[in-house]
Image (tube, helix red, strand yellow):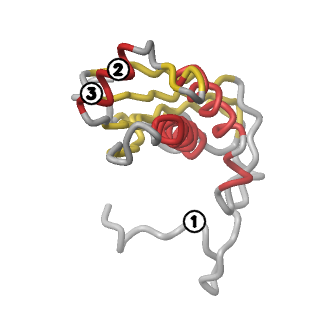
Amino acid sequence: MTVAAQTLSHVDDANRPAMVDVGAKAVTRRTAQALARVRFPPEVAAQLHRAGHVTAKGAVLTVANIAGVMGAKATAQLIPLCHPLALDRCHIDITMQGDDALIACSVSCQGRTGVEMEALTGASVAALTIYDMCKALSHDIVIAEIRLLGKTGGKRDVDHSAGTSA
C-alpha cells in the first residue's frame, strides 16, 4: 500500500492532531523489537574495551541498559499522541560488534495498541545514553541507525529482522 493510499491515524477529519481512539479494540498481547546502532571511532572502541566499558561517568552499558528501560516506560510522556501503556516486559540487550554497540530493545504488554514506539524509544534512549557517557572520548561517535525489527499483535505482524546481525 502506498503512503498516498493510506490514511493517517493521528489526525482528525479537519487534519488536526488527534489521539487515536482505541477503546473499541480488543486487548491482545502486543510485542515489538527495535535496534539502535552506535558507531565508535576505532580508537574509542578499543579504549572502551580496554577499560571494560567504564568511563569517568560510570559503567556505560549498565547505565544505558537502565536508561533504555526508563525511556520505554516514559514513551507516552515523550511522544505526543502516544497512549500510556502498562508494559509487561522491557528487555535491553547491548552487545559490541566490532566498533559498534548494538542495542536491542524488546517490549511487550497486554493492550489495545502496539508497543513499537516503546521499543524504538527504549533503543533510542539507550543509544543517547551511550553517546552522553562517551562523548568526552570523542564527538565522532555516531548513532547510525534506529529501526523497528518486528512487532506482533494488532491488525498485522511485521518482521524486518532478516539480515539483522543483532
Q: Label 3, label 2: how many angstroms apart (C-alpha)?
A: 7 Å
Residue 162 in the image: state x and y as whole percent.
25, 29
Q: Earlier in the sequence, mark 1 or mark 2?
A: 1
Residue 59: % across, % down: 56, 20
Disc 1 + disc 2, Cβ < 8 Å: no
Disc marking residue 99? 3
**Quarter of image, res 104:** top left
Q: Residues within 10 Å of mark 2 (few under 14, many from 20)?
A: some
Q: Amino acid at mark 1?
A: Ser
Q: Residue at 46% across / 40% down in the picture? A: 136
Residue at left offset 65%, top offset 45%? 113
Find residue 8 and report its horizontal and vertical position in percent.
Answer: 52, 69
Q: CA distance from mark 1 to mark 2?
A: 37 Å
Q: Amino acid at mark 2?
A: Met
- Work out whether 83 lies above or below 92: below
What residue did someone put label 2 on?
A: 96
Judged from this view, the residue extending furthest toward the bottom is 14
SS at circle 3: loop
Residue 18, by quadrant, is: bottom right
- Locate the C terminus and report the quarter of the image it occupies: top left
- Res 120 visible: yes
Q: Residues within 10 Å of mark 1 (few under 14, many from 20)?
A: few
Residue 9 marker: 1
- Secondary structure of the residue carrying tag 2 is strand
Q: CA distance from mark 3 to mark 1?
A: 39 Å
Mark in front: 1 vs 2: 2
Q: Quadrant of the N terminus?
A: bottom left
- In the image, taking residue 61 as reference, residue 84 lies left or right, namely right
> Of the residues under marks 3 and 1, which one precedes in the sequence?
1
Closest to the observer, 127 or 117: 127
The local secondary structure at tag 1 comes to loop
